[in-house]
Image: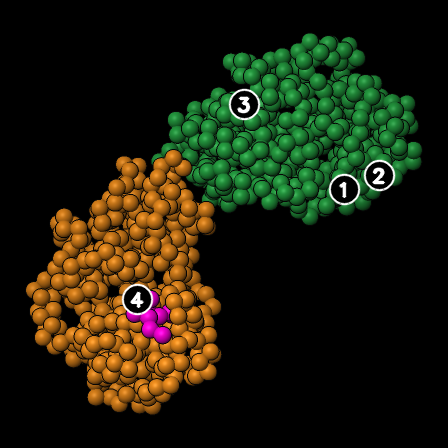
Chain colours: A orange, B green
Amino acid sequence: MQAKPKAVRLTDAERFDWLRLIRSENVGPRTFGALINIYGGAGAALGALPGLARRGGAARQIRVATSEEIERELKAAREAGVRFIALGEPEYPPALRQIDSAPPILALRGRQEALQQPAVAIVGSRNASAAGLTFTDRLARGLGAAGYVIVSGLARGVDQRAHIASLETGTIGVLAGGHARPYPPEAAPQIARIIESGAVISEMPIDWEVRGRDFPRRNRVVSGLALGTVIVEAARNSGSLITARFAAEQNREVFAVPGSPLDPRAEGTNDLLREGANLCARPEDVLSVLEPLRARDPFSILREEPRDAAERLWGEPALLDFDQDSSPGGGPGDAFDPEAPDRGASEPPRALRARIVDLLGPSPISIDDLARAAEAPISEVRIVLLELDLAGRLEHSGGARVSLTPLRERG
Amino acid sequence: MQAKPKAVRLTDAERFDWLRLIRSENVGPRTFGALINIYGGAGAALGALPGLARRGGAARQIRVATSEEIERELKAAREAGVRFIALGEPEYPPALRQIDSAPPILALRGRQEALQQPAVAIVGSRNASAAGLTFTDRLARGLGAAGYVIVSGLARGVDQRAHIASLETGTIGVLAGGHARPYPPEAAPQIARIIESGAVISEMPIDWEVRGRDFPRRNRVVSGLALGTVIVEAARNSGSLITARFAAEQNREVFAVPGSPLDPRAEGTNDLLREGANLCARPEDVLSVLEPLRARDPFSILREEPRDAAERLWGEPALLDFDQDSSPGGGPGDAFDPEAPDRGASEPPRALRARIVDLLGPSPISIDDLARAAEAPISEVRIVLLELDLAGRLEHSGGARVSLTPLRERG
C-alpha cells in the first residue's frame, strides 16, 4: 500500500513551467511524470526536451510550448473563470491522483470542493432509450442523495441526464476538449448550471478543439475521478465501454445496467455483466459495493491490488513524493527548481539506445523484459524509452508495456 | 462420485406395488425411497405402512392405495396412451434420477426417446412481454438446433412458446396434475402436438386435479430433467424463481435473461444475475456452459459436489442399487418380493421414539445432529422419522433437515 502522498503547492513560476511542459509536443501525463522524476522539476525538463527527442531519433526539432502560449492560456483562463490545479496540490481530486496517467494539470470551472467528495461516474448511450434516461435519472438522484458526486462526460443522452439529475447534489463534467470550446456545443447552458454547485474540468489547453482521439483520453479521467463507474446503456464497441475498461484497469468498480437481449443498446452492458461487472438495477446496488470502500481511509479507498512497481512504466508509485526521493539534493523545493542539476539524467550510451531500438518491435513488451534482454540497468532503459517517447516513436499498451510506433518504425 | 446405477426392469406385479405405494397417503418420493430401502420392496413396505404410521402417532388409520384404484389408473392409462416408467429403469431420464426427490414413477405420453437426450429447461412469466416471447422463441430454436430437448411446464406465456419453438427438435412438457386433467386446459391441443415428437410426463395419478401446491413440486421435475434452467422473465416471488432455486439445489446450471430495471418482469431475473446466475442473452451463452458438461460421461454430466451421505435424509445415494445392498438376502429379484422378510426393519424401542419426538421441534435439525442428541444408532433414528413422516408429523427442509409439523406438534 502506498503512503498518503504529501500535498504540495506550486509557486506561480512552477505552475507556469508545468503548463509549458505538459503543453509541449509528445509530452503526455506519463512522460511528464518521468521527466519530473528524472529532472527533478519541470524547468529542468523543459531544457532537456530537445536533446532527449533528438537522441530518441526525432525527425525534426520537438515543439516546446512557448512562454507566450502559456501567457495567452493563463489570460484566457482568468477571463473564463478557469483555475489550474496541479497533481499533488490539496485541491486535486484524491481518486484521480491515484491513476497511472493522472493529468498533471486540471483546468477547473466551478466549485473545487466537488472534487473532494466521493464520486460515481454514470455514462451511457448518446441515443439512449426513454427507459435508459428514466433509469439514469433515478440512479443519479439516489446516489446524489447518498452523498456521491456524479461524474460524466457532458455528452447527449445518458451523460447529460446524469448531470441534470445531480445538479442539486453535485456533479462533475469532464470535457474532452478545452473550456473555451465545449463539446457538444449545446452543452454550454448546462455547463453554466453545473458550475454553480459542481465543477467542469479539462486537461486540455483552454482553446483546444476536440478531436476523436480525445474522447477515450477524457474517459480515463471520468472513471479515474470515481470510485465506481455505472454503464447505463451501451451498444457494442461504444465509448462507454472504453470508460468501463479504464475503470477496471484503474481498479475501480464497474457496474452495468441489464437490458433486454433484443435491445442493441443493452448488448454492451450485458456483455459487461457476462464478464463479471456488478449488476446495477437500483442505487442500492452501487451503494452496497461502494459504502464499505468509502468508510475506509480516503487514500486507501480504492481496491488495493498487489502492484509490481517494476511493471509500471515510470516506476514511482507516488509521483510527487519528492521528499521520499533518495537521489542527491532531492528536497521538495529543489524538485521544482528549474536551475536544479539534471539529477539521474545521465545520458545512456549510444550502443544501448541502438540495442533497445533493435529489441523493440511492433509487439508490446514489458520494460522489465526489455531491460533483461538489453542487459542494461532499468534506469538507463527508462531514459532511452523517454527519448523514444519524446521523439514520437513509442507506443504504450496495457500493463506498462511498450512497442515501437509502427509507422515510424526503423530497423 | 456415485457409481453409474445399474438399470433394472420391474415386473408387472412390482410396478403395480410401486404405484400402490407412491399413491398411498403421506408417501412422497423420499419416503418411498426409504421404505424400499428398509423393506427391500414395495410389497413389503405396503404391508408395513399401517403399523409404521400408527407407531408414528397418526391420529387415524393411514390410507393405503387399494388394488382397485391402481387397476382403474392402469386402465385409464392404457386408454390414454400413458406408459409408466419406474426410477431405475433404462427409460427413466438420466438427469432426473440423480435428484434427491426423483419421482419413483413417471407417467409418460409421447416418445420416451426424448427423455434420454440432454435437455435445457426454459421457464418464465405467464404474462410475458412480446420481447420475452420473441427471445424465448430464438433461444429454444437455437438450443434445439444444437441438440437439446427443451423442457418446460406447459404454462401460458414463456413455457408454451418454448414448447412450440422446439416441436420439431424435441420438447418435454411436465404436468403439475394428472394426464387426464391437463392444466391449463387450453394446453390440450399443444400437448397433442408435443407428444408427436416429444413427451409429456406427470408423476401424479392420471385423474389428479391440480392444486396450488402441485406447481412447485412439478417445478423440481422441470429443473431436474435438465442440465440447466433458463429463466426468461420473472417477477419477484414468481414460480419461475422456484424452478431456479430447485435447479441450484440440484447442482444444475441456472441462467437468467437480463432485462430493464424498469420492467417488473425482469426483477426476478436481474436478482438471479446479481446472485451469480449465468447471463443468457443468446443460445451460445447456454451452450458455452453446458457443452463441456455434455461432452463428459452422461452419468457424471452434472456438476459434482462432495456430498456427505449422512447429510441426506435417506442416505443411500443410488436408490435402486439393490445389488450393492449388503443386507442379507438382498438380490435384485428378492428386493421386489412382497413376501421378503422385513430386512432391517426392526422396530425401534418405544423410549427412543418418545425421545426423538421430544428432541424435535419447529426448527429444522439435521438427522446426524438428531441421532447424536438421541444417542441412538442412525438406522433406528431413520425408522422413527419414517414413522413420523407416514403419520404426517414430519416436515422436510433443505439440507436433509427435519422438524415436527407445527400444527400437529405434541409435547
Question: Which of the two labelled residues, at mark 2 and mark 3, occupies the earlier sequence position?
Answer: 3
Question: Which of the two labelled residues, at mark 3 and mark 1, occupies the earlier sequence position?
Answer: 1
Residue at image position (17%, 53%) is: A183
Quadrant housing residue A209: bottom left
The magenta span reads A400-411
Identify the chain of the residue marked 2, using the numbered disc in the image.
Answer: B
Can I make out residue A6 in this image? Answer: no
Label 1, secondary structure: give it: loop
Closer to the camera: disc 3 or disc 4?
A: 4
Closer to the camera: disc 3 or disc 1?
A: 3
Where is B287 relative to A302, above or below? above
For the residues beneath circles 2 and 1, the answer to whether they share a chain is yes
Identify the chain of the residue marked 3, using the numbered disc in the image.
Answer: B
Q: Judge by depth and name the residue closer to the eye, A98 or A19.
A: A19
Find the distance from the CA under tag 2 to the CA under tag 3.
Answer: 40 Å
Q: Which residue is mark 2?
A: B324
Closer to the camera: disc 4 or disc 2?
A: 4
